[in-house]
Amino acid sequence: MTLFCATFPPVGRGVDASGALPQFDLTIKDLTPKFLTFYNEAAKEKASPDRRWELWKKDYDFAAVPP
């Protein structure tokens, strides 16, 4: 499901010599249903932190930490 799409020039760049702006597409994917499945499964089994991490890796395969 696509929630939002936008086209915009990159930061710090403006119009090129031809006057055309470079085009970029942004697509945002709604992961809410996937998260709710993870959350409900972890809550149902009263998962420990280690077990929650296993469930998270099964569905996402990445850590949810700031860059």
Image (cartoon, helix red, strand yellow):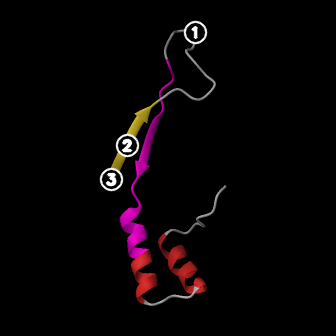
Left or right for 12, reference 24: right
- C-alpha separation, residue under disc 3 versus residue under disc 1: 37 Å
Residue at the disc numbered 2? 4
From the viewer's perspective, is the residue at label 2 or at label 1 nearer? Answer: 2
Mark 3: secondary structure? loop
> Do labels 3 and 1 touch, CB within 8 Å?
no
- C-alpha separation, residue under disc 2 versus residue under disc 1: 30 Å
Q: Residue 44 location, x and y as percent?
A: 40, 87
Q: Residue lying furthest top in this view?
A: 18
Q: Earlier in the sequence, mark 3 or mark 1?
A: 3
- Hey, what amino acid is under mark 3? Met
- Hey, what amino acid is under mark 1? Ala
- Work out whether 31 lies above or below 21: below
Find residue 34 and name its label: none
Residue lying at 61% horizontally and 22% vertically, measured from the top left: 13
Q: Residue lying furthest bottom in this view?
A: 45
Instruction: Give the crowd class for mark 2: few <14, some 14-19, many >=20 residues within 10 Å.
Output: few
Q: Residue 61 location, x and y as percent?
A: 55, 69
From the viewer's perspective, is the residue at label 3 or at label 2 nearer? Answer: 2
Residue lying at 57% horizontally and 9% vertically, measured from the top left: 17
Most foreground residue, 60 or 44: 44
Q: Which residue range is magenta in the image?
A: 21-38
- Hey, what amino acid is under mark 2? Phe
Residue at the disc numbered 1? 17
- Work out whether 44 lies above or below 14: below
Instruction: Give the crowd class for mark 1: few <14, some 14-19, many >=20 residues within 10 Å.
Output: few
Residue lying at 50% horizontally and 19% vertically, measured from the top left: 21
Q: Earlier in the sequence, mark 2 or mark 1?
A: 2
Mark 2: secondary structure? strand
- C-alpha separation, residue under disc 3 versus residue under disc 2: 9 Å
Residue lying at 58% horizontally and 66% vertically, measured from the top left: 62
